[in-house]
Image (cartoon, rainbow, N blue to C red):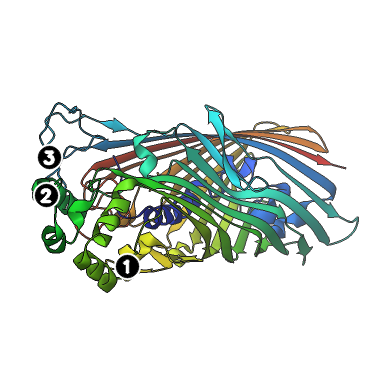
Amino acid sequence: MYKIRLRPLAAAIIVSGCSSATFAQLGTNLSVDVRSLSMGNAVTADPPGISAIHFNPAALTKIEGLQTDVQGILANFDIKREFEVPAGYNVFGYSDDPMVCNDGPEVSSDLCTDFKSTINGDVEYVSLYVPVLKKMVDLGEGLPMAAPTAGIAYNPPGSKTTFATAMYAPLVAGFGAENGNPANYMGQQVALERITYLSPSIAYEVNDELSVGASVGMSYQAIGLKTDLRFPNELIGMLRMIDEVVCTPFKENSDIITDILLLGICNAQEGMNPFGRFGQMQLALEQSLSPSYNLGVLWEPTDDFSFGMVYQSAAKMRLKGKYHIDNANAPRELINGLMSSPTGQILAAILGFPNNIPASESGLVSMDFEYPAHFQAGIKYKLLPDLQVNFDVGWTDYKAWDKFRFEFDRQISALKIAKLLSENVSDSSLALPLEFTSPWNFGIGLEYSATDRLKLRAGYEPRTSAIPDNKRNTMVPINNAQLFGLGVGYRFDADTDLDLSIGFLRSKDNIPANTSSLANQTGVNNLLLNPYAGLNVKTDTKITILGLNYRTRW
């Protein structure tokens, strides 16, 4: 289970921030290069062909003449999400949450008498954001995500300089589910993409042992989100109690006295419910040109040993896009009730509440977004004439994602209410505290030359999460993860190589009730994004990647 409550916009925006952050770890380097995938991405000292543009542009000097690379990568996402009810579960004394409770309308108790054992909210298909259409597209249940790439490099005869460019996807991830899926309260559809469509690069061979290189990446960045919203919060539980207990005697025979004393709340045609759906939010932000650069060094003192180092710069962007919110009837009726009473109007004016909440709200949204910088260094060493080991360590500056700030082109009714409960909210902006960290990771790869033509590869990359324990959530269905890779390379002739690889990424996470302020925290101050407040949450993510690379020299 997982949902929360206040106004649709505030929560949905937060969700989009989480999705980008989470997926950055989920998809990084999974769709760049086939050989690197099979080597646990430990290729800084032994970059693969034209993909050296990304992993270490200095290694482009190893290319001779004119070379082209064409790759195709397929990825299948298997993401399971489970919600469980712990002992003592309730929100302000209510536990009849239809998402976790089997009780029908014939049971009048506010406390559930028959909880569901486990609630599943599995991902059902892959989603992608299509720039031309400016919307998310579902690929259909069971269909994998495809990421084709291509590159070309040229080393003039007798020259120490190599030129190259490539089109590849440093990050592609997205998923979706049908209506009614319990996990839709933290993203029914989510998509995050960074596609480098042009990467002019140059590498120079200083001497027989040392090479340097640089590349400039021109990329497209997009974030897309569609999510249902709910807010199981103590304050909403109190409003339900007022509606069902205090207001019941006055529903049909209210007068000016009761309107004044009860602030008009009892005039609402529909009461608030902490387990009710509060609407739906759709959001899409993008930037067509997001430049960055890579700098690399490659040192090869002997045929058996080499050392490589690369710095991939941050890319600072101003993402812009549109949002659309459909507001449910209950919060609209609450404001209508307040506006029907003189004292309610006075209270709303003092608190800065809106005079009404429209059925839908649309407009423009923007945010400053930084694709984090990355540093990686590694070695290649031949243990035996036919057996090579690669080892890399890397660091990514996810600490740059300390906070995401969304700015809207107008005042939002949801934010005018939420600002009373958070210093991170104003009438037209919302800041989401993520508090990410910048971990170090390592990868290791083995390559065995079975024959002069055939090479066998294996790799392992444990990925330490940058997400703090108190910020874990189901929209980012990954925490610590492990990536395993296997591959085979075959040389048909002196100018033609074929690489085939398979990768498998696995991440399991357990988020006990009341441990994450972006998933299941209880209390009065969890209004922004805790749709599964008080519930135990588990995720199990499996990603299988299959890739084929065809490399030709002319």
Amino acid marked by disc 2:
Phe
Mark closest to the chain's N terminus, 1 or 3: 3
In the image, taking residue 114 as reference, residue 435 lies left or right, namely right
- In the rendered structure, find residue 87 and report the number of the disc placed on it: 3
| Dot 3 alpha-carbon crowd within 10 angstroms: few under 14, some 14 to 19, many 20 or more | few
Tell me the kind of residue under disc 3.
Ala
Viewed as shown, does residue 216 lie left or right of 346? right
Residue in the image at 38% along x and 56% along y = 467
Residue 495, x across and y down, in percent:
83, 38
Q: Tag 2's secondary structure? A: helix
Question: Residue lying furthest right in this view?
Answer: 157
Q: Which residue is mark 2?
A: 250
Point out the tag, 1 or 2, that comes first from the N-terminus.
2
Where is residue 352? Give x, y as percent.
Answer: 31, 70
Q: How many numbered discs sit on the rendered protein?
A: 3
Which of 426 and 554 lies nearest the eye of the viewer? 426
Judged from the image, the secondary structure of the residue bearing numbered disc 1 is loop
Which residue is found at the position 32% from the left and 52% from the top? 332
Residue lying at 91% horizontally and 55% vertically, measured from the top left: 157
Amino acid type shown at disc 1: Lys
Give me the C-alpha separation between circle 1 and circle 3.
Answer: 33 Å
Q: Nearer the viewer, residue 141 or 461?
A: 141
Residue at horizontal 35 percent and vertical 66 percent from the top? 416
276 to 456, vertically: above or below:
below
Q: Which of the labelled discs sits on residue 419, or is there none?
A: 1
